[in-house]
Image: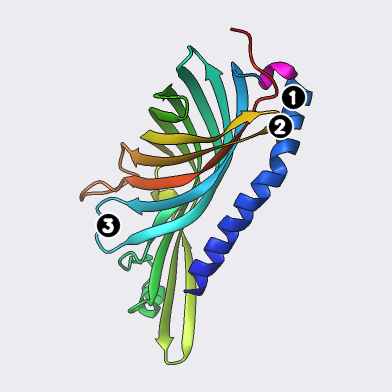
């Protein structure tokens, strides 16, 4: 329960902080790249949200909750169509309460009997490239491929080998996970407030599904990353673009 409260608190801090960081981030981009990066034809958005992740074919696992954060480039192709490549350096995934896995060390495995919880934490850098279509002035849908680069992978075991003694064991499993994951993204978003003069907000719901088995060696059903995300993007548009 405490871990869930801490996670929600961290996510809330990120959401609140994003409002404060928006103008500074946008002003810096304009300073570096000029006014052309803040028009309706070409602009950036700061994105922050919550991820509910899962790994397919892990029947006993539970959703892992984490925060995600990144930058979106919005490129207008037509009045209704946009190309939106994204860079998400903070995009953790994984699963909670997975079945006990052997470590390969018999002495250590003996201590991991009946763990109270076993979590798998995966850290990725995501680069989705989406096409966004504006259904109406405010409602939008997006879809496209995503490539993810693994930056870390850890199994965490909490067990009680002796009465009253809690053992926390972290096992680096990065060598067992493929370094690159390929997947697809579909998203529905809503323009909550129009982005003009450095202000604005878009709220979104997104589903990600990996196309390949994340494990390097797996003789069973494929384990694929799967996640739902929701959050907000804060676009910066200083002035209207040229039609």
Q: Residue 172 placed where, x, y %?
A: 48, 58
Q: In percent of the image, x 59 and y 59: which residue is there?
A: 10
Q: Which mark is residue 58?
A: 3
Q: Position of residue 175 (x, y in %)?
A: 44, 49
The reply to whether callout 2 and callout 1 are in contact (CB within 8 Å) is yes
Residue where numbered disc 2 is placed: 26
Mark-to-mark CA distance, 3 and 1:
46 Å
Q: Is label 3 in a helix, a strand or a loop?
A: loop
Above or below for 91 versus 184: below
**Residue drawn at (44%, 35%), measured in percent from left and top?**
189
Residue 46 against residue 120 in the figure, above or below: above
Mark 3: few, some, or many residues within 10 Å (few <14, many ≥20)?
Answer: some
Task: List x then y, in percent, for residue 232.
Answer: 53, 42
Front disc: 3 or 2: 2
Q: Which contiguous range is marked in magenta?
A: 34-38
- Left or right: residue 25 versus residue 125 is right
Element on which disc 1 rests: helix
Of residues 26 and 219, the one nearer the viewer is: 26
Q: Which residue lies most toward the top here?
A: 243
57 sits left or right of 201 in the view = left
Residue wearing tag 1: 30
Q: Residue at x 43, y 30 (%)?
A: 139
Q: Residue furthest right?
A: 31
Residue 183 shows in the view: no
Q: Residues within 10 Å of mark 2 (few under 14, many from 20)?
A: many
């Amino acid at each position: 329960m405490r871990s869930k409260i801490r996670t929600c608190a961290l996510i809330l801090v990120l959401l609140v902080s994003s409002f404060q960081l928006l103008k500074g981030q946008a002003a810096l981009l304009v300073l570096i790249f000029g006014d052309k990066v803040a028009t309706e034809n070409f602009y950036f958005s700061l994105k922050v949200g919550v991820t509910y992740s899962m790994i397919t074919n892990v029947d006993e696992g539970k959703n892992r909750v984490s925060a995600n954060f990144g930058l979106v480039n919005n490129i207008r192709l037509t009045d209704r169509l946009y190309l939106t490549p994204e860079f998400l350096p903070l995009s953790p995934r994984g699963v909670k309460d997975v079945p006990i896995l052997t470590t390969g060390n018999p002495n250590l495995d003996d201590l991991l009997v009946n763990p109270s919880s076993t979590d798998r934490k995966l850290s990725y850098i995501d680069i989705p490239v989406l096409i966004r279509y504006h259904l109406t002035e405010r409602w939008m849908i997006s879809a496209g491929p995503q490539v993810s680069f693994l930056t870390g992978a850890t199994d965490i075991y909490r067990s009680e080998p002796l009465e009253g003694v809690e053992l926390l064991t972290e096992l680096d499993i990065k060598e067992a996970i493929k370094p690159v994951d390929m997947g697809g993204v579909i998203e529905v978003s809503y323009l909550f407030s129009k982005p003009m003069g450095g202000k604005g907000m878009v709220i979104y719901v997104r589903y990600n599904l990996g196309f390949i088995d994340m494990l390097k060696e797996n003789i069973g059903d494929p384990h694929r990353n799967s996640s739902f995300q929701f959050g907000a993007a804060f676009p910066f548009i200083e002035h209207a673009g040229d039609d």
